Image (tube, coloured by chain):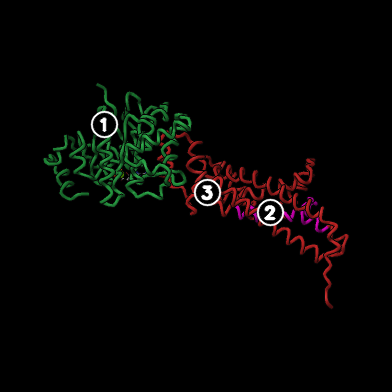
Chain colours: A green, B red
Amino acid sequence: MSAAVSLRDVHKRFGEVEVLKGVSFDVAPGEVVAVIGRSGSGKSTALRCVNRLETIQSGEIEVHGRRVDDPALDLRALRRDVGMVFQSYNLFPHLTVAENITLAPRRVRKTPQSEARHIAVEALARVGLSDKIDAYPEQLSGGQQQRVAIARSLAMQPKVMLFDEVTSALDPHLTGEVLKVMEALARGGMTMLVVTHEMAFARRVADRVIFMHTGKVWETGAGEMLAHPQTPELREFLANGL
Amino acid sequence: MRYKFDFGALVEHWPEFLSGALTTLQMTAFAVVFGLVIGILCAIGRRSASPFLQWLCGFYVETIRNTPYLIQIFFIFFGLSSIGIKLPIFVAAVLTLVINVGAYTAEIVRAGMDTIHPGQIEAAQALGLSQPQIYWDVILRPALERVYPALTSQFVLMMLASSITSQISAEELTAVANNIQSFTFRAFETYIVVAFLYLLLAVILKLAFYGFGQIIFPRRRRLGTAL
Ligand SMILES: Nc1ncnc2c1ncn2[C@@H]1O[C@H](COP(=O)(O)OP(=O)(O)OP(=O)(O)O)[C@@H](O)[C@H]1O
Ligand SMILES: [Mg+2]
């Protein structure tokens, strides 16, 4: 079976600084892969290369058979297939929750207004926020905003979801509600690539964990890998936290 | 010596005052619409990747904002006629207004666009929106909502400044007043009436902008707060 996402020897430089130094890994369809690692190790960059928010210098990236590094790539088709949720939610402040969710379906998929409302209702049900459909982002808590951001991504019916430290900006008592939504998504069979500092989540929910260090995949394995680190770098990372 | 006010002599001139005020309003309406279009295009140009576009828009904005409006009027009016282009005076006057207010609008709109966090644009890109869609839905709409008060007060200022187009005999309110006082020799009264009419126009404009803002910015209407 071919991979949902695959990276082959990916190199990425910002100016002189090489941030990804030959990164390779696969994500199978329906698999949940957690990416962990120290700040600056290249986790976000690797994620952002997958939906081409960043372009790479060499190597190959494929998403469901589509070559992401191909200059002739149909970017919008790629981004229809790949959803992304950010640390800072990035909801559109001038639009209601429903409008946030339906903007992309209406503009990109040309979904008619009448159907769009239905999409918003369904997406919000999945994140447990049906009662907030007509609220504005500023009227929501951080956790609620992040769940709306997840719903906004889901509304495009992506095949793969990217999560970049989506709970890092939240108060500890709000992270749980977001992680619960993500866990439900994972159980529902969504293919997920999740950069996270939540070790408990990585262990419990992820099928596989990737530890990145200095721009390379340093160690990879199932969730138990976190209980039995093989490399001194992972051991140190787990001991010292972030 | 005591001055004796006599507004009576002006009463019969009310149709002229009215027509002058309407002309001022018409000029303002045209200038707002076209000035806004130019301002938005120019603000986008200054953010574009093309150095030439950046330079062109920057040159226009800075030149207009750093020269007197009266000189711009003469430059455009006499400049055009000396190269053989004869425009109706109303059109020429509106043209000078558009060119003038377009530059101020560009700066205001650009400031609004600069408040849009790059994360907003990335989120829109990740959702698959195209560049024009991002400009419209994610950059321009919230930017305009944010700078709407600054924008509308600029437009009111422009309506007041349109008084200067009387210098090229545009038949707007100030030109009408100049005429009337030269017939009636009631300069003081005439300008009191005209000042009052400008004040009235400014209030009408502000109310209209407020109402329009309530319609096009539903968030503002519902929450009553600035974005
Ligand atoms: N746009 C950019 N321009 C220049 N350097 C960048 C850019 N984005 C990231 N970097 C650099 O690339 C390196 C990796 O950054 P990245 O954001 O991928 O790390 P990360 O693992 O996600 O870290 P964190 O846990 O802090 O989010 C860092 O040294 C960072 O300074
Ligand atoms: Mg990061």
Q: Which mark is residue B145?
A: 3
Label 3 – label 2 distance at C-alpha? 21 Å
Return the residue nearer the eye: A217 or B189. B189
Q: Is residue A211 left or right of residue B211?
A: left
> Disc 2 designates what residue?
B159
| B162 magenta-colored | yes
Q: Residue at x 21, y 40 (%)?
A: A202
Q: Disc 3 residue type?
A: Glu
**Chain containing the residue with disc 2:** B
Say if B192 sits above or below A89 in the image.
below
Q: Which residue extends farthest bottom?
A: B1
Q: Is residue A101 visible?
A: yes
Q: Is residue B198 left or right of residue A26?
A: right
Badge 1: residue crowd in 10 Å (few <14, some 14–19, many ≥20): few
Q: Position of residue B106 (x, y in %)?
A: 58, 48
Q: Disc 2 residue type?
A: Met
Of discs 3 and 1, which sits in the foreground? 1
Label 3 – label 1 distance at C-alpha? 40 Å
**Chain containing the residue with disc 3:** B
Q: Position of residue B167 (x, y in %)?
A: 78, 54
Q: Which residues are magenta?
A: B152-178
Q: Disc 1 residue type?
A: Gly
Label 2 – label 1 distance at C-alpha? 60 Å
Q: Position of residue A239 (x, y in %)?
A: 15, 49
> Disc 1 designates what residue?
A188
* Element carrying mark 2: helix
Report if the beta carbon of the residue with label 2 is closer than 8 angstroms to ligand 1: no
Q: Is residue A150 left or right of residue A109?
A: left
* Element carrying mark 3: helix
